[in-house]
Image (cartoon, rainbow, N blue to C red):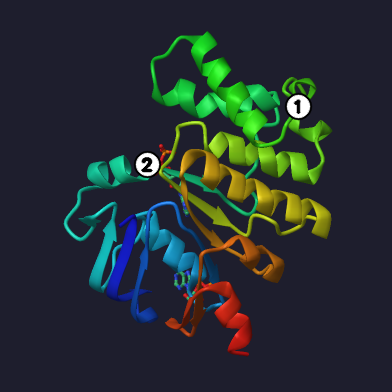
């Protein structure tokens, strides 16, 4: 199991956010988290990133309970995750290729040519063409920026990919293209994907949808069942 929550309560100070939530995310699943503003989606991602510990209940990441882990041990788990935030900014002073090489250069001692080859491969999988690799972020369309951010999140070969509203701000065609790309990434690398989304069409690529309302899970099932239940 990649992620497992068991009767999790979470919160900040006196604010209780999650009120006993349980769910599982299996290897290579694409799971969507949906719900209105304030439902607890961002806090759920913080728990999955080990940035917040539960007040009660168990959060298991890659089979390990995070309750008694040190910051160093949590960082080791985070190193197995790739993240694309809603406003994931690319480094404006770096080319597309340099942006994708950067996390690897920072973390690993590898030959530059190997890092570059790996970055080119990730960019190609993410649908960028070689002539785009030497462009700067400000020369890219919104869709291309998102693809570059995704390639960068894949640079260290994460087992779990976390996406926070990946298609927000994209036109419907670019959004559909990006959804297909997420599916390709899962099919190519076997990456598990957890994404917060407001985009109903995106649910099509998901194996499972978790709907949150007021800190509780009100739906956990296949996307088609969600539409049938309405
Ligand atoms: P969502 O992402 O679904 O909009 P959040 O997880 O951001 O929901 O927020 C859930 C609840 O927790 C909200 O009531 C919000 O005001 C509260 N909250 C979020 N972050 C903090 C924080 N850092 N400190 C105190 N309360 C917070
Ligand atoms: P590093 O110093 O190696 O960048 P961090 O602890 O800053 O490690 O971040 C680890 C992972 O958690 C990164 O993928 C980062 O994007 C993500 N992260 C960092 N801060 C936050 C945050 N406030 N909310 C959600 N995710 C975060």
Name which residue lies at 75% across and 55% down.
175
- Report whether the residue tagged 2 is closer than 8 Å to ligand 2: no
177, 142: nearer the viewer: 177
Q: How many marks?
A: 2
Q: CA distance from mark 2 to mark 1?
A: 27 Å
Q: Dividing the picture into quarters, in which one does residue 81 lie?
A: top left
The correct choice, above or below, for 192 with respect to 135 in the image is below
121 vs 81, left or right, is right
Q: Residues within 10 Å of mark 2 (few under 14, many from 20)?
A: some
Percent position of residue 132, x then y = 77, 25
Q: Dividing the picture into quarters, in which one does residue 143 lie?
A: top right
Name which residue lies at 72% across and 40% down.
145
Question: Element type at marker 1?
Answer: loop
Quadrant where the C terminus is found in the figure: bottom right
The correct choice, above or below, for 54 with respect to 154 in the image is below
The correct choice, above or below, for 51 with respect to 153 in the image is below
Could one spot residue 149 in this view of the protein? yes
Percent position of residue 92, x then y = 70, 31
Could one spot residue 12 in this view of the protein? no
Name which residue lies at 74% across and 20% down.
134
Percent position of residue 90, x then y = 65, 36
Residue hosting label 1: 129
Q: Which mark is residue 80?
A: 2
Q: Residues within 10 Å of mark 1 (few under 14, many from 20)?
A: few
Percent position of residue 9, x then y = 31, 77
128 vs 141, left or right, is left
Q: Which mark is residue 68?
A: none
The correct choice, above or below, for 8 with respect to 205 in the image is below
153 vs 92, left or right, is left
Quadrant where the N terminus is found in the figure: bottom left
Asked whether the residues under the numbered discs 2 and 1 touch, taking CB atoms below 8 Å apart as contact, a structural biologist would say: no
Name which residue lies at 71% across and 67% down.
201
């Amino acid at each position: 199991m990649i992620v497992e929550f068991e009767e999790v309560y979470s919160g900040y100070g006196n604010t209780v956010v999650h009120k006993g939530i349980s769910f599982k995310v299996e290897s290579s699943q694409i799971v969507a988290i949906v719900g209105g503003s304030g439902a607890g989606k961002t806090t759920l991602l913080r728990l999955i990133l080990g940035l917040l510990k539960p007040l009660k209940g168990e959060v298991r990441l890659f089979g390990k309970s995070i309750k008694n882990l040190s910051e160093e041990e949590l960082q080791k788990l985070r190193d197995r995750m790739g993240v694309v935030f809603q406003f994931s900014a690319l480094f404006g002073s770096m080319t597309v290729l340099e942006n994708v090489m950067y996390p690897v250069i920072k973390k690993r001692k590898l030959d530059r040519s190997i890092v570059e080859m790996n970055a080119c491969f990730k960019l190609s999988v993410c649908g960028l063409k070689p002539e785009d690799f030497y462009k700067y972020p400000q020369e890219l369309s919104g869709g291309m920026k998102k693809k570059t951010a995704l390639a960068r999140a894949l640079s260290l070969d994460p087992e779990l990919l976390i996406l926070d509203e990946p298609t927000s701000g994209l036109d419907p065609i670019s959004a559909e293209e990006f959804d297909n790309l997420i599916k390709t990434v899962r099919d190519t690398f076997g990456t598990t994907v957890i994404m917060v989304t407001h985009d109903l069409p995106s649910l099509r690529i998901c194996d499972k949808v978790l709907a949150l309302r007021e800190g509780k899970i009100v739906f956990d099932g296949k996307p088609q069942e969600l539409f049938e239940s309405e």
